[in-house]
Image: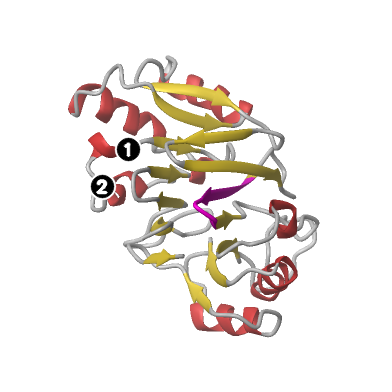
Amino acid sequence: MTLSVTILGCSGTYAGPGGACSGYLVQSPSTNLWIDCGAGTFANLQRHIDLADLHGIVCSHSHPDHWLELPVAVNALRYGVGRPNAGIPLVWTAATAELFGAVSGRPPEPTFASRVVDETARVTIGDIDVSFSRTDHPVETLAVRADHDGHAIAYTADTGNDWSLSSLGSGIDIALVEATLDDPTPGIQHLTGSQAGSQAQQAGVATLVLTHLAPGSDPEARSAEAATAFDGPIAVAEIDRTYTT
């Protein structure tokens, strides 16, 4: 394994029965990085790693389906797992940090070492280099690129089509691209399957993984839509599925 991503949750906006909101475990041989902490993903994370082996968290934006497990994770690590002073890197936007404080009533330190970032930031967690690009979404939202040993995984987070996956650079092996909408909807900043495919094609992505589908969506139809614009391998995200570069 050089760099992989395991789906912890992939439902858009809310989770249907048995599902979970956005969350992804990116792994190199020595680093476990949890990207987005949507409802239901903390339990799923523990099927894949021991909490003693969590090395860092990145939260893409402040919409609740992408971060609300964070207060639960702090409590678990602080009181349940015995890592109260672990100083685990926590990277998030300013609005996410503000909302966390309102919900939890206290900072995440010393269990986490938090850092507010914007699209200009570059962060290294373990042996994974992380970079960002601000997407087309109503709140500050950061698409995420994770690099290790010449391999790259990208995650669009939430975005409309007035942003380009290409802004995360070339050489992307696996791209997790949101595909929330059945049809383009004016004023709603999310992507359709065909828009997700076009984004991946223009960025020269090797493998496209569609994610953030709304509960009740037809995965096969969404994949077929993406295939009209993208000529590489396409998968639709499933909880516990791992994709490896």
The picture places residue 241, in percent across and down from the top left corner, at 36, 66
The reply to whether residue 218 is in sight is no
Placement of 101 over or under 184, stated as above or below = above
Residue at the spot x=55%, y=72% of the render? Answer: 207
Residue at the spot x=56%, y=42% of the render? Answer: 130
Label 1 Cα crowd, 10 Å radius (few <14 / some 14-19 / many 20+): some
The picture places residue 234, in percent across and down from the top left corner, at 54, 77
Return the residue at label 1. Answer: 54
Disc sitting over residue 149 in the figure: none
Range shown magenta? 143-151
Placement of 176 over or under 88, stated as above or below = below
Please state which of residues 43 and 232 is positioned toward the viewer in this rendering: 232
Return the residue at label 2. Answer: 49
61 left or right of 82 in image: right
Check if mark 1's residue and mark 2's residue have beta carbons within 8 Å.
yes
Helix, strand or loop for disc 1: loop
Residue 155 picture quarter: bottom right
Q: Is residue 101 magenta?
A: no
Please state which of residues 19 and 8 is positioned toward the viewer in this rendering: 8
Q: Amino acid at mark 1?
A: Leu
Q: Pick whichever of labels 1 and 2 is earlier in the sequence.
A: 2
Q: Amino acid at mark 2?
A: Ile
Secondary structure mostly seen in magenta is strand
Residue at the spot x=54%, y=42% of the render? Answer: 129
Helix, strand or loop for disc 2: loop
The picture places residue 114, in percent across and down from the top left corner, at 49, 23
Q: Is residue 145 magenta?
A: yes
The reply to whether residue 105 is in sight is yes
Placement of 237 over or under 147, stated as above or below = below
